[in-house]
Image (cartoon, rainbow, N blue to C red):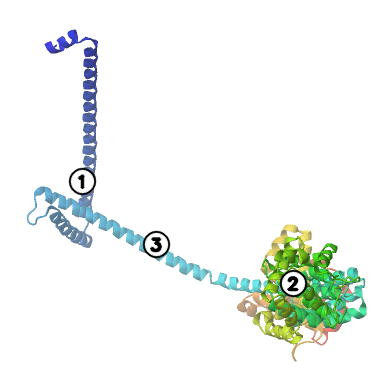
Amino acid sequence: MPDAVLRVRTEGGADALALLEGLDRALGRSRSRRSAATARAASDDARSYRAAGDEAQRQDQLVTRSRLRHLALQGEQQKRAVALYTEMHRRATEVLSAEIGRRGDLTDRERRQVEGLALAMVHQHETAERRRTAATVRAERERAAQRRRFLAGAAEGIAGGVRRGAEIFAEYGDDVRAKQHTRDAVELSATRIAASDIGDAGASSQLLAATQRTALDTGLDPQGVVDALGTAQANFSALADAAERGTYLNEVLPMLARAAVASGTSLTDMVNAAGEFQRQLGVSTAQLPVALAQAIQGGRLGSISFGDQARHMGVIGGAAARFLSSRPEDALQSLSTTNALFQFAGRAGGGGDVSATRARAFLDNFTSARGQKALNSRLGYNVMGADGQIITRDGETQSQAFQRVIQDVYARSRGNSTRFLDTVAGQNNRSRTLGDQLFRDLRKHGGHLGDFSALVSQQAQGTVANSIDAPFRAVHATAANARSRREVRELYGLTSSANDWARDTEDQLAGLREAHPLVGRVVGADPVSRAALDLTNMAANAGSASVRAPDAGRPTTRAALQLAIAREQASASMQREFSPVGLASMDDGVRASMMRYRTAEGLARLQLRDQARAEGQSTTQISEESIRRLADEIARSLQRNPVTISEHDAVHAATVRTTR
């Protein structure tokens, strides 16, 4: 131990000793870190060396395999391989020369590098060629498979076309059944209204006829029309009296339907509006067209559409009728005043529902005892008489009397809005909103209701010609309305035969679902199966408009036509089952026998369906055994005496008697 260290240890004391021990520990940790770093560096070098060795070994193996393969090649293959290697060697030389930055002779090491690179390039080129060849082979195989699928699928394509045709026919049958359901629903509604609401089940035919006429004329949905008739009876008893019923169905309903189309209002809302006009304001049936025309005109000029007026007339009309005259001579003037108040309520915004609430609140306050007391206190005279009607002066209408009262309140309030609203509108916020619109009109025109008066007067310019007929003709000429009317015509254009075969299919599917739920659902969901049932049922209902009309050479009686159809079906089944060569080579007797029995079987099906329908039975209950027995009888009859078209009626009657 050096003397300096020994001296420090002996003379320095505890602090010096602690310092020396700390230095020793630091030196030890430093040596450990250097040793660990040296070991890690050595390990990394070893791994790098091993990796480099593995790569060099892999390259040597690659070069060796390439050399061995080239040596194994013979003839043209060897020539191509030598040419490829020569080209790759040239490219490798250019790459290495460019990398080292000089031209000329290469060292032995560099030449070995060039050789290895050239062989690697040859290997990559050949691998790429093999991949391209494999891709070409796969593409050719796929094209060949496509050609096979096309040729093999030709028959499937034809079958697919047949299926698509069946699907189209099934869609036609489904459409017929949907139209049937619509007509059944309309008939059900008409029967319910007649039997329950009117109390006369025989009136259903009148309702159905009026519904059809109205829908065909306007394009309105028949269900909507019959529902509107139900509303007319339920709310206003418009159809209760037999004499008035005819007037309503033949005159009022067509006019209301045209007005609904012209104004874009539902027929039910129009029926409600007309009923409220008559019930609340005393509008007569003769005045009704003009009343509707003026109301439509008011909707054009004001803030609220006629559709909203029609929906809410029951709310505001009843309140207005408390102080406005319902005498026939005053009815139109009272209606104009009511509509004008509704329009003024709409000036504050919010739409029809909010405006109707405002008008109702204002009218309720105006006619209430509290409202009349406020008016009397402000004006010094009574506004309403003992009969509950507003008091008029000489030469005044009630509309003019109402405007005079409002203007007097404004004058007595000295243009103060608070006093004015307290007098005419009370404390209800909705009522005061309408009162504020009246106050604005008064202030704008120096104490006169200028806009209100003009609106009342301008409504009188609405006529049936310019408010109903002209707009209806314009809508009637559009493609959309023409389409609606065409759909209604198609709905009512179903022939009885179409109804029969479509309903037969529906009954058969229902019976099948009842007997075999799963099978019935599968068959019902398959369009081809539905189309087959439709076609069979259509043929069974031969002689109707749904089957090809007979010409000069075609039978005209039902029995003869059924025989012709059975023969056509038998011939078609023979052609489907046997090829033309097979039919030609078949013995005449065998072919005639098969044709005869298939005709008999088809005829038996058609006749038994007739018999079941005549007896009110379901066609789904016809058993295959009964068809076979009748077919055997018909076949024996045809064999004994080949039947001509003119003779078949007797055979039909005889065979039907045989099965009873």
Secondary structure found at label 3: helix
The amino acid type, in three-letter code, at marker 3 is Arg
Sequence-earlier tag: 2 or 3: 3
Q: How many marks?
A: 3
| Marker disc for residue 51 | none
Which of the two marks, 2 or 3, is nearer to us in this view? 2
Which of the two marks, 1 or 2, is nearer to us in this view? 2
Locate the C terminus by quadrant: bottom right
Residue position marked by numbered label 3 in the rendering: 138
Residue position marked by numbered label 1 in the rendering: 60
Q: Position of residue 31 (x, y in %)?
A: 21, 24
- How dense is the environment of label 2, judged by Cα within 10 Å: few (below 14), some, or many (20 and up)? some
Locate residue 28 relative to residue 107 in the image: left or right.
right
Secondary structure found at label 1: helix
Q: Position of residue 57 (x, y in %)?
A: 22, 43
Locate the N terminus by quadrant: top left
Q: Quadrant of residue 221?
A: bottom right
Secondary structure found at label 2: helix
Residue position marked by numbered label 2 in the rendering: 411
- How dense is the environment of label 3, judged by Cα within 10 Å: few (below 14), some, or many (20 and up)? few
In the image, residue 346 sits, relative to residue 250, either above or below, namely: above
Residue for point 22% across, 34% down: 46
